[in-house]
Image (cartoon, rainbow, N blue to C red):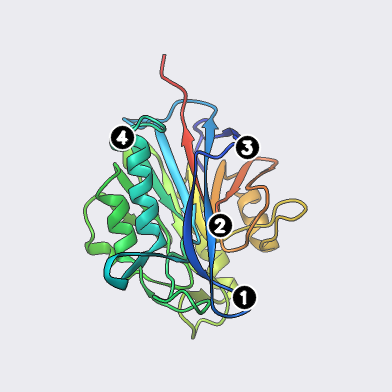
Amino acid sequence: MTSRAPIRVAGIADELIREIHYLNASPRGGTEVERLPVARGELAAPLAGELDALIVCSDLQGVVPGPQGRSELLGVQVAVVLEHLAAAGAIPAAARTGVLLAGDLYSVPAANKRGGYGDVANVWHAFAARFAWVAGVAGNHDDVSAVAAVGANVHLLDGALAEPDGLRIGGVGGIIGNPRKPGRRGEDDQLAAIARTIGLGVDILILHEGPHGGDHQPGNAAIRRAIEAGAVGLTICGHDHWRDPLTHHDHGQILNVDARAIVLVAPRRG
């Protein structure tokens, strides 16, 4: 494990930077309008390299209507809106911001059915074209077979480590489940992959299915034990929605960004 000081979230503001309206599949059937919150968080210390901020998000499962009846995946619109906010000075400059994606970026085109499985390369491309780099994992609804071709500043992780701007970022995609279904591994295999990745010495661990937190913060107990045993400083995850996105364990923090985007802004150097 890493001996460097852990990356720590000092707090997340209650007042949102923005809300993004989109269409999502209703649990009762059909389609409904929802709002994706875009929040601002503060990091406790400056980031390495040329970074001033990190954008973190997951479970952007919806669409935004476009011209001539066409729609685009919600994540594409999120990247566009965040670029505009950076250009307006509401958040740090896009060129000095990295992006962390924790999976489940796909929606069926009509946003009228939950689940599904499909290509999410457009979302990765939208972020990679606008920000310094993108690192992340696949969710269980994501076909990521075309993501590797998006660009050199893209780091799709699954048991691997990337080091953009000096950050040691590890990731494991998918969820625990029937390995015959897309985006799933047996429990022993998934936990082994997480343990191996932690053993590479990570500053940030990105998972799709993550650990549980406190009350109203559901997740996997075995994954929680793995990150505590590995003393992971900051874990990013999604899959299960948390009303309050941040929690702590004895060695670090867990930030669940299911159906939200958070811009983590670092203090100025010096």
Which residue appears farthest toward the top when viewing the image? 270
Asked which secondary structure carries label 3, the reply is: loop
Q: Earlier in the sequence, mark 1 or mark 2?
A: 1
Left or right: 115, with 15 as reference point: left
Q: Pointer 2: what residue? A: 258
Q: Is residue 54 visible to us here? A: yes
What's the CA distance linking mark 4 and mark 2?
26 Å
Report x, y in % for residue 204. Answer: 49, 45
Asked which secondary structure carries label 4, the reply is: helix
- Tell me what residue is drawn at x 32 percent, y 72 percent: 69
Q: Residues within 10 Å of mark 3 (few under 14, many from 20)?
A: few
Report x, y in % for residue 131. Answer: 30, 43
Residue 103 against residue 13 in the figure, above or below: below
Position of the C terminus by quadrant? top left
Q: Pointer 3: what residue? A: 14
Q: Name the amino acid, label 2.
A: Asp
What's the CA distance linking mark 2 and mark 3?
17 Å
Q: Pointer 1: what residue? A: 27
Report x, y in % for residue 64. Answer: 40, 63
Asked which secondary structure carries label 1, the reply is: loop
What's the CA distance linking mark 1 and mark 2?
17 Å
Q: Earlier in the sequence, mark 4 or mark 2?
A: 4
Q: Earlier in the sequence, mark 3 or mark 1?
A: 3
